[in-house]
Image (cartoon, grey):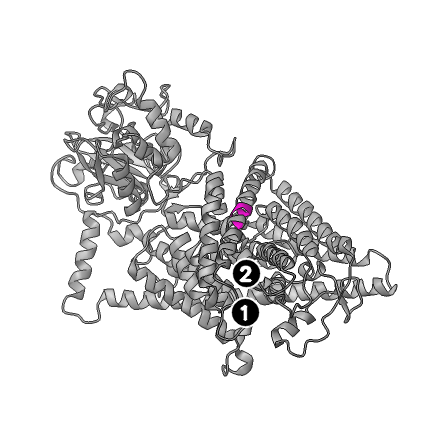
């Protein structure tokens, strides 16, 4: 609506503000902020990549009159009752948590079973073709082309899943982390995303790419938890009466369920329930509570119980076998009652941790540059993304086949294995002959490539090499030949258009690096038993590289301990992971944080940016001062034009004195217009601007029943005569909105905004008159830097300069932001 229209449809603008109509030629402060935001010398910001159009979650309810009336009715119903609404809600919450854990366990079991079946089929035909070539019964190159055919077929299905749903690409951990931070990324927790993610990662793992299922399992658990808690999907339109309660259909409840699902995803991937809880606490959730801890623990427990039950059906739930769950195998002590390492070797483990942190930093930096190039040249086209997947798959297949061929040396299988454990005998049977004589020889490099990653990790962990009992093992040259190409391919693959995780590739490459270090140390003392076995060094290397890539410490320590089942490695793992984290942080951030910044997602860290500590920034300098406001009783035409012209989520409501009355959410305004909750003043024989309330036409449950798909302004059809009607916003206004004084420090503003999980924060002066609004993007380091530069221009003072605006009676409106927050 143009500001020059009749003033009868104009709302109020707070004193001290200019109008900012859509047609205004004056550049708003945020437009200059955007230009600096794009030019900020941040290494994570890919050039020419626009920030995503995202909204923030709202974890605090709008405390309006209709909200209070709904709570009052519920309290009256519960008065004198033992079985109250709160108890019913709590029981249902725990039952939904059980369902989330069980479903995620079943999904993980299906994914593991199908991927292993596909891999077994592929390896069976490829192994047979290799032996036919050795015997001269097949033409040379048959095995390679058969290998290429299977790889291409599997990866095509994985890429097609991403073609159907683009957000299913990658691990999903950065997206889940952003969701739990309060950012409503589109389509992240949809059922379609779950289907494409699970099926896609199943085929991408079976395709032999250096990827894992662990990250996608976290995303899978988040989607399952979100869908179960809401009981409603856009795909099927299902709305069960069991979950149709207002208490669960809000951002706060959904956030807590997603945290439970993320922990269940880690548990289903590693069979590590405690590690899953700590992962959700350390790496996932930005908001935590003691009650949530119990729910997350309970959900992880149910996931593990489901895996135990399903994988032990053959024994009819008799004696359970832990070997059927994910495990790194049994780390047996070389001497009874003693650990496998000396105390002075903790220093060597710390050195491996530092080297792993350096490797992880190089991995992250290289992948960052590849991702920037990919965002500029590939990601804008679905066809290019599919073509890139095909090209990378061809490269991975060719390199994977060439590496054992280049090695070309056949090693005899261990013969004297009578005193070996059953686990070690199984590992010997799993060695791959490639083009060697089957049953007598094996190819060291092929045994790490032409097998599942889980089996390759166990090979590196459990082939003995210590003291005088030196057993057949992987040579240093073979480990180096495997490590360098594999980690290079993993760097290239992460980010292509297939669902993929990085836990297992990092563990496998790190295990090769650690075993290489242990092998070289044994060379120094001529295998006299001075150092620990190479398997222990392989475990430290795996932890170091994964910790250097992801920068996780507490949760990763527990995950690895639960996967090994050996408490003797508690202290070595802690030292290794801390050294890896400290070393990696010297150079860059963790890979997940890097990808969050590359996508320009407004993620709020736990602590305020350092610029707040180094400079005296106050809320007045950070806020957006182009504020559009509405009156407590406003004309329909004004509201409709505001919603049509601006895409923001909230509008301040001010009285005739310019004092802040409350706030009105966009969802609420659209719902009122769609349900025609307005009337003419003559209908009630009252002055629409008077103190008397118009009776609410909508209840709180009617407004929130359509969560999260509220009506949009396009759904609101108005007749010409409707524009002159009035909407009484007083029963629906959030009269207890969070506010902050304009002189508040940046640190206090940041803590209030992030701790309370706000969508926006009203800034008022000492007279409680609104002077600006702060949104999520205003608190990012780049925006704070720009505000600091702007405020230090000559002639600019607190509350003055460009923001000292004259009185105006022009159109009501909203903050002129480019992205809805």
Percent of width and height locating residue 734: 22, 44
- Disc nearer the start of the sequence (1/2): 1
Are discs 1 and 2 less than 8 Å apart at CB?
yes
Q: Is residue 606 left or right of residue 574?
A: left
Query: Looking at the figure, which quarter contains the C terminus?
Result: top left
Badge number at residue 539: 2
Residue occupying the point 15% across, 41% down? 684
Whether residue 733 appears in magenta in the rendering, the answer is: no
> Which of the pair 79/456 is nearer the observer?
456
Helix, strand or loop for disc 1: loop
Q: Which residue is mark 1?
A: 331
Left of 590 or right of it: where is 705? left
Residue 359 magenta-drawn? yes
Eyeballing the image, is 638 above or below 69? above
Residue 563 on image: x %, y %: 50, 66
Assign the magenta stretch its main secondary structure.
helix
Secondary structure, mark 2, is helix
- Residue depicted at x 49% and y 40%: 587
Q: Considering depth in this image, is 421 or 340 the residue closer to the camera?
A: 340
Disc number for residue 659? none
Query: Nearest the camera: 415 or 561?
Result: 415
* Mark 1 crowd level (few <14, some 14–19, many ≥20, 10 Å Cα): some
Q: Is residue 372 left or right of residue 707?
A: right
Outermost residue, top side:
795
Asked if one can make out residue 190 in the rendered structure from this viewpoint, the answer is no
Looking at the picture, how far across and down is residue 284, in whole percent?
Answer: 41, 53
Q: Which region shows up in magenta?
A: 356-360
Quadrant the N terminus occupies: top left
Q: Percent x, y for residue 591?
A: 50, 46
Crowdedness near tag 2: few (<14), some (14–19) or many (≥20) residues, C-alpha within 10 Å: many
Total numbered circles: 2
In terms of image quadrants, where is residue 666? top left
């Amino acid at each position: 609506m143009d500001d020059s229209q009749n003033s009868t449809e104009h709302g109020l603008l707070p004193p001290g503000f200019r109008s900012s109509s859509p047609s205004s030629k004056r550049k708003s402060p945020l437009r200059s902020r955007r230009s600096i935001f794009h030019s900020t010398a941040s290494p994570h910001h890919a050039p020419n990549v626009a920030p995503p159009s995202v909204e923030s979650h709202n974890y605090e309810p709008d405390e309006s009159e209709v909200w209070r009336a709904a709570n009052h009715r519920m309290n009256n119903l519960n008065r004198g009752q033992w079985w109250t609404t709160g108890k019913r809600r709590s029981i249902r919450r725990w039952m939904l948590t059980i369902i989330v854990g069980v479903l995620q366990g079943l999904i993980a079991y299906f994914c593991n079973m199908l991927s292993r079946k596909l891999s077994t089929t592929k390896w069976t035909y490829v192994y047979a073709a290799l032996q036919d070539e050795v015997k001269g019964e097949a033409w040379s190159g048959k095995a390679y082309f058969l290998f290429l055919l299977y790889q291409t077929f599997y990866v095509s299905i994985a890429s097609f899943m991403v073609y159907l749903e683009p957000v299913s690409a990658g691990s999903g951990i950065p997206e889940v982390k952003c969701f739990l931070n309060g950012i409503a990324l589109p389509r992240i927790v949809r059922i379609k995303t779950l289907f494409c993610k699970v099926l896609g990662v199943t085929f991408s793992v079976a395709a032999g790419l250096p990827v894992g299922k662990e990250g996608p399992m976290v995303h899978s658990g988040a989607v399952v938890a979100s869908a179960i808690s809401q009981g409603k999907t856009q795909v099927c339109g299902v709305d069960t009466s069991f979950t149709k309660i207002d208490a669960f259909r809000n951002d706060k409840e959904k956030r807590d369920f997603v945290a439970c699902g993320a922990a269940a995803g880690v548990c289903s991937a590693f069979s590590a329930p405690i590690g899953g809880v700590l992962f959700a606490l350390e790496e996932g959730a930005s908001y935590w509570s003691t009650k949530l801890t119990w729910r997350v623990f309970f959900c992880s427990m149910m996931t593990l119980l489901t895996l135990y039950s399903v994988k032990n059906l053959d024994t009819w739930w008799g004696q359970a076998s832990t070997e059927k769950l994910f495990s790194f195998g049994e780390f047996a002590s070389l001497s009874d009652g003693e650990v496998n390492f000396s105390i002075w070797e903790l220093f060597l483990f710390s050195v491996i941790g530092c080297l792993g942190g350096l490797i992880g930093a190089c991995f992250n930096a290289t992948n960052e540059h590849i991702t920037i190039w990919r965002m500029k040249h590939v990601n804008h086209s679905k066809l290019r993304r599919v073509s890139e997947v095909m090209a990378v798959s061809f490269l991975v297949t060719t390199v994977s086949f060439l590496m054992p061929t280049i090695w070309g040396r056949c090693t005899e299988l261990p013969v004297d294995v009578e005193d070996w454990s059953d686990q070690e005998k199984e590992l010997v049977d799993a060695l791959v002959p490639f083009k060697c004589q089957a049953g007598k020889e094996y190819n060291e490099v092929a045994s790490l490539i032409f097998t599942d990653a889980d089996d390759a990790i166990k090979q590196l962990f459990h082939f003995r090499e210590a003291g005088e009992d030196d057993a057949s093992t992987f040579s240093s040259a073979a480990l180096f030949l495997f490590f360098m190409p594999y980690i290079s391919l993993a760097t290239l693959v992460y980010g292509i258009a297939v669902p993929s995780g990085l836990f297992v590739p990092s563990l496998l490459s790190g295990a090769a690096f650690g075993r290489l270090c242990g092998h070289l140390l044994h060379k120094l003392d001529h295998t006299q038993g001075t150092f620990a076995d190479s398997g222990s060094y392989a475990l430290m290397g795996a932890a170091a590289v994964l910790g250097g890539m992801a920068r996780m410490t507490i949760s990763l320590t527990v995950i690895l301990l639960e996967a090994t089942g050996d408490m003797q490695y508690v202290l070595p793992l802690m030292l290794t992971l801390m050294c890896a984290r400290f070393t990696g942080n010297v150079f860059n951030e963790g890979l997940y944080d890097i990808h969050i910044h590359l996508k320009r997602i407004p993620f709020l860290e736990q602590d305020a940016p350092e610029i707040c500590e180094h400079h005296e920034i106050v809320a007045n300098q950070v806020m957006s001062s182009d504020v559009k406001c509405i009156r407590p009783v406003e004309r329909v035409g004004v509201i409709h034009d505001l919603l049509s012209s601006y895409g923001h989520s909230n509008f301040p409501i001010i009285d005739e004195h310019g004092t802040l009355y409350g706030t009105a959410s966009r969802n609420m305004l659209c719902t009122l217009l769609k349900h025609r909750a307005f009337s003419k003043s003559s209908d009630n024989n009252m002055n629409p601007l008077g103190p008397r309330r118009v009776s609410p036409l909508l209840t709180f449950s009617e407004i929130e029943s359509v969560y999260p798909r509220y009506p949009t302004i396009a759904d609101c059809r108005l007749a010409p005569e409707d524009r002159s009607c009035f909407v009484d916003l007083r029963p629906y206004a959030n009269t207890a909105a969070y506010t902050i004084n304009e002189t508040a420090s940046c640190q206090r503003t940041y803590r209030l905004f992030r701790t309370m999980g706000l969508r926006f924060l009203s800034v008022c002066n000492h007279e409680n008159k609104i002077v600006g609004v702060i949104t999520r993007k205003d608190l990012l380091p780049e925006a704070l830097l720009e505000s600091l530069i702007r405020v230090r221009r000559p002639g600019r003072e607190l509350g003055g300069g460009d923001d000292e605006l004259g009185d105006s009676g022009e159109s009501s409106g909203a903050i002129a932001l480019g992205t809805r927050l």
